[in-house]
Amino acid sequence: MLRAMAMVRPVTLSLHLKPLLPCYFPPKPLHFSRLSKLVQSLTTRASNNNAGCGIIEPNYLSCCLPDKNNLRIALLLSGGVDSSVALRLLHAAGHHCTAFYLKIWFQEDFENFWSECPWEEDLKYAKAVCDQVDIPLEVVHLTDEYWKNVVSYIIEEYRCGRTPNPDVLCNTRIKFGAFMDAINNMEFDYVASGHYAKVIHPSADEINQPSVLELSKDMVKDQTYFLSHLSQAQLRRLIFPLGGISKDEVRKLATLFNLPNKDRKDSQGICFLGKIKFSEFVARHIGEMEGIMLEAETGDFLGNHRGFWFYTIGQRQGLRLPGGPWYVVEKDVKNNVVFVSRNYFSFDKRRRLFRVGSLRWFNGSPPKETSELQCKVRHGPGFYNCSVVIEPGEVDDQDVAIVQLCEDDQGLAAGQFAAFYKGRTCIGSGVILESWNDQGFPVCERALELARIEDKSELGKPVKIKVKPEIPVREFDGKDGIEVERGLNNSQVAVTS
């Protein structure tokens, strides 16, 4: 392992990277109208570049700029299957690639987890993938940049009771932010990654037009939501080879290429945490502060917690309360109180009207027609039809979008992103603001009064919850046809002092 890793050249932002060729980064005009004429040449090129792997079908190269010759491309390689297949497709299309592994793991702050560093295994796979086709691999250390631009923001958002999205921030500020800055004086024409999305660049006669971010072929894996807050300057530098390929096809290509990580599972969870539990990360960097849990409907004191920042609205796991299922329904950030209820699904808490700030549009301004747009309020294949009204904001003269969904959503969370679409085109996004024109879950007055008590010891001991055996009710969600647990049937849970 150490010998293999020693062959990978580390690069740090504190050093000046020396360009091998004269500096050139802005993308060249692209022409997609000639794609049909390239079928024969692409097949021949793919065959030559992938000897022993079979012939790569031209449609797999449609998002690799196949009509351009010998582009110099910097590819972000994570050690996973997606970015590895993206690398091999660009290589098959005849481009000159250099792979970059971003080391953002701040192991210095977690010495006790040193034996479980996730980047060592990732880097091993990344190097093995590059060695197959003799592609150079560089390691870029962005630990300090990641801490300053992503982790610190996440910590502050949780302190304020909001729920940030680390993946959106990582894309805008690190992968296509600090990394692009690090290689800006090198010779690359484009930056690529294994994201499931499409970028359509303007043709030669429309060079002043903006580049466009479109949905990928695989709607389940589509990652335009995580890319929706990029700037136009960032988008113009990017290509995503997997934009026209489904996840199943990516797995088949990994087998065809005989990639060393072809059977490796997809990574899950927040990118910077590795094998560390999120609760441990929060405890280490925000700390703990004992607070109380109150039942929203009665104000009954049910128990203590370690800090409101460990909980999100709708959370069920980790409450450790008998007689459930219990759900987090509201939080009092000022008084460090978490309100819980067993009736999370019985209350009509759904919303269809909310505000969005920190707006960013790919073409520089809001769309002229805002009455027939689509909106994503979380990652996934689901959309809402929506209308958007742009109004002047109260802070720094920044505009705020008033979003009206076509139907209710009960999972809107302040701090998350709302991405806007027009057909298959992602036009921009913004951050969902605190509740507006919405009173949330109806917490009773007694619970609110108890939450404001300064000396919580006056509450005495938590109430005892006696539970009678009961069979959970299982219902079918009419929208998705999915069986979900709604709670207890005719609950016979008794709360006594």
Image (spheres, helix red, strand yellow):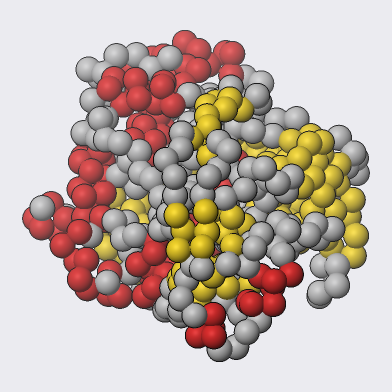
User: In the rendered view, would you say 282 is above or below 52?
Assistant: below
Q: Residue at x 42, y 40 (%)?
A: 469
Q: Position of residue 360 (x, y in %)?
A: 73, 56
* Relative to 334, residue 351 above or below: above
Q: Position of residue 375 (x, y in %)?
A: 73, 40
**Residue 128 visible, this angle:** yes
Report which quarter residue 165 is drawn in: bottom right
Count of marks overlaid on the render = 0
422 lies left or right of 149 = right
- Whether residue 168 is visible to the viewer of this picture, yes or no, is no
In the rendered image of this protein, does residue 192 appear above or below residue 41? below
Q: Residue at 70% x, 30% y: name it.
A: 424
Q: Residue at x 27, y 22 (%)?
A: 255
In the displayed structure image, the side of residue 29 where residue 103 appears, left or right = left
State the image coordinates of residue 132 (x, y, percent, origin top left). 21, 34
Name the residue: 20% across, 41% down: 128
Residue 194 is situated, as x and y percent measured from the top left of the image, at 44, 39
In the image as oriented, which residue stretches furthest toward the top?
40
Going by the image, does 71 lie left or right of 208?
A: left
Q: Residue furthest bottom?
A: 455
Of 464 and 36, nearer the camera is 464
